[in-house]
Amino acid sequence: MIAVLVFLVVCAVLGYRIISAVPSLLHTPLMSGMNALSGITVLGAIAVYAVAPPELQWAAGLAMVLAMINVAGGFWVTERMVRMFRGRRPGRSDRPSTEDGEGER
Amino acid sequence: MLPAFSPALVVVGLAAVGFLVGIRLMQSPRTALWGNRLGAFSMAGALLFALLEVGVSLPAGILLLVGGGIGIVLGQKVTMIRMPQMVALFNGFGGAASALVALTAMGVASGDAGLASLLTAAVALAVGVLTFTGSIVAGLKLQAWLPQRQVVLRGHRALLSAVLVAGAGLIVLLVLPPRRPELVLQLAIVGVFALYGVLMALRVGGADMPVVISLLNSLSGIAAGVSGVAVANALLAGVGALVGVAGMILTQIMCRAMNRSLVSVLGGLREVGGGGGGGARPTPSARKHGARSRDDPEEAAVALLRQARTVVIVPGYGMALAQAQQTVRNLATALERDGKDVRFGIHPVAGRMPGHMNVLLAEAGVGFEKLYDMQRINPELPETDVVVAVGACDVINPAASTAEGTPIYGMPVINASHAKAVIVCNLDERPGYSGVDNTLYGERHVETLWGDAADTVAGITRGYQRGRTVSEPGDELRERAVSAIRGARSVVVVPGYGLALAQAQEALKSLIDALEEAGKRVGVAIHPRAGGILGHMAFLLQSAGIEHDRLVSLEQANAELAGIDLALVVGACDVANRAAWGEPDVRAAASGMVALRVEEASSVVVCNLDAAPGYSGVDNPLYREPNVIPVWGDAARTLPLLLERCAERVANDVP
C-alpha cells in the first residue's frame, strides 16, 4: 500500500505541474479528457469482478459498464472537440506553408 | 506490495507516462489531438493488460463492450452547448463506478479486512456516491430539468453539517472492530452520502456551475484514487489523483475568476439577493435616456464598426442562450473581409464550464488563434477601437473595480470600458447573475442594443454589409476596377515591394489563376528594383507558385504595354513613377533607369496601401491619370475583395 501511495503522490505532483500549464482555451477538452481518465476505475472493476462473491457481481459489472462509458465517451468527445480547434483555419491551411517563414523576416 | 520488477510494473509506468505526456500535449491546440490519442492508446494498453492478467470472461467482455458502445454514442451525439451536462454525467459515472468497486472490494475482503483497506474503501464509497448524486443534480440543473436557481432549504447548512457528521460516524462504525462490513452499514453510508451530494448540488445556482462541475470532476478523480488505494491498484490510484488534481486546479481558477470562495459557492452564500435588487438605485435606463438619446442605436453601432480598425468581441453565456454563435461569427467574418482586426476576448467563466465558450466558438468555425483569454486581451483593449459585448454582463462590469462591498468587487473582468467604444448586445439592462448593476451601460462611449442577441447582432451585420456596398467612398472605384478587370483580355501585373510587405503573394496568385481561367492572357512585369534585393521579387513570386515563365523584363514590358488592356499595379509605386526616375532635378534613387510605363495600358488598376509616395519621396503622377483606378488599402485584403467581386458578378450575370 505504501508503494501505491507514493505513486499516487508522484502522479499528483507531476500532474499539477503539467495541468497548470494547459491554457483556458482547452479547459473543456481537458475536463472531458479527465472524464476518460477517471474511467481508469475499469481496471479496479475488472479486478474485483473476477473475485467478487456472487451477490456482488452486479456491482462490479455495473462499475465496468459505467467506467467504460467514461473511457469511450470521454476520449471520443475530446477527439471531436480538439479537432474543431485544429481544423478550419480559413484559407491558409490547405496550402504548403512556405509562406510562414517569409512573414517572420 | 508490488515486486521490484514485473510486467505489471512496466505497464503501470508506461501508461502513467503516456497519460502525463498526453496531458502535456494538451497544452497547445496544435498538439492536443495527439495528446488525446496518446491518452486513449495508453488507456487501451492498460485495459488490455488488465484483461490478460485477470483472464477475460465472456460476461465481462460483453459488459465492457456495452459500456464502450454507450460511451461512443453519447460522445458522438452530444452538442457542444450541452458539454457541461455531459461532463457532469461522466463525473457522476466515474464516482458511481468507484463507489461500486469499493463496495465490491469490501465484500471480497470481508473475511480479514485490514483497517487501512477498509477505511479507504469506505471513503471511496462515500466520495463516489456523493459525486454521483451531486453530479446528477448538477446535470439536471444544467439541462434545466431542475430549477437552475439555487434551491435553499430551511436550515440547509445545519442539515448539511448534520448529514456529514452522520456519514463520518457511520464510516467510523464500519471500521471499528470487529471490522466486519455489514450490508446495513454500507447501505446507510450510501444513503447518507447520496443525500449529501443532492443537498450540496441543489444549493448551487446556475452561474456557479463552472465551479461545481470542476469540483465534481475533482471528486470523481479522488474517488477513483482512493478506491485504487483500497484495491491496491497503483495505476488506478495514480490516475485518480491526476484527475483529482486537474479538477482542483480548474476549481481554483473558476473560483478566482468569479471572485468567490469555494465555501461561499457550496454554501450558497450571496451577499446580494439575486431576485431582489431593490428599487432605490438609479436604473441605467433613466440615466441613459435622459442623458443622450440616440435615434437608432443600431445605426450608431454600424457607424462605429465601419470606422473601426480593431474590434474585440466579448461573448457571454447570453450569446449561447440566444444561440447566436453563428451570427456572431458572421459579423466577425464581415468585419475581417474589410481588413479589420477581429479578436475574441473570453472570460474564464463566460460559459457553463471551464473553457466552454472557446468550444462553442470553435464549433461555430472561429479559429483558435483569434480566441484570447482575459489576461491576454485586457492589455490590448486601450488600443481597441470597438468592443462588441454579446450576452455578457458581469464579466465586463467596470463596477468590479469600483463598487466596494458588492459581490463582484475585486472580480477580474474584461475591461471593455477601456476600449474607445463599446457596443453591448444584451437581452436587457437587468444586472447579471451577481445582481450588481452594470455601470458600463451608462457610459458615454457605449451603445446598447437590447434584445435577443441573435437578432441584434444579425441586424448590425446586415446594416454593416449594406453600408459597405452603398456608401463606402472606395466602393465606386472598386466597382470600376472590377469592370476594368472583367473587360480586359490581356493583363500585365506589376508587383512592388508593397506586395511582399502585405504578404499578398498568394492572394495575387489566386487572382492570376482566376483571370487565366477566364481566358485572359496574364504576364507579370518585374522592374529590376522591385523587391529588397535584385531578383527578390521573382523569388517571392516563385515561392507563391507564380512561375518564372510568366515573368516579363522591364524592356519587354515597356515595349508591349501600349497594346495591353489592363495593367494591375500591386504595392508598386516608384517603379511605375516617371517623375521619380526621369527628371534630373528630383532625388532619383537610381538615375539612368526608367519606370515601367504602366499608364500606356488601356486602363490601370492600382492596389497600393495609399497615395503616399514610395522610397524616393516623389509623388506619383500616375495616380492622377484618367485611365487609372486606385483601390487603396492592404493588398492582402483588396486583391481577394476584387477577386470575390469579379466572381460575384459572373455569378450574377449567369441567371
Image (tube, coloured by chain):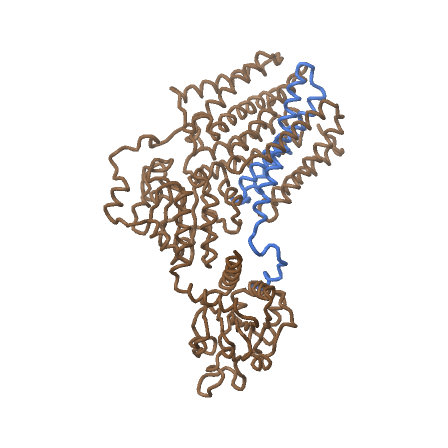
Chain colours: A blue, B brown
Q: Is residue B617 visible?
A: no
Q: Residue at x 46, y 39 (%)?
A: B351
**Could you tell me residue B464's position as x and y percent?**
40, 54
Residue at far bottom of view: B584
**On screen, residue A80 above or below B556:** above
In which quadrant will I find the N terminus of chain B? top right
Foreground of the two, B261 or B133: B133
**On screen, residue A70 above or below A25:** above
Foreground of the two, B122 or B220: B220
**Could you tell me residue B120's position as x and y percent?**
60, 23
Q: Residue at x 54, y 39 (%)?
A: A28
**Could you tell me residue B368's position as x and y percent?**
53, 49
**Could you tell me residue B171's position as x and y percent?**
55, 17
Q: Is residue A45 visible?
A: yes
**On screen, residue A15 above or below B485:** above
User: In the picture provided, is B205 more to the left or to the right than B509?
Assistant: left
Occupied quadrant, residue B538? bottom right
Foreground of the two, B401 or B279: B279
Occupied quadrant, residue B392? top left
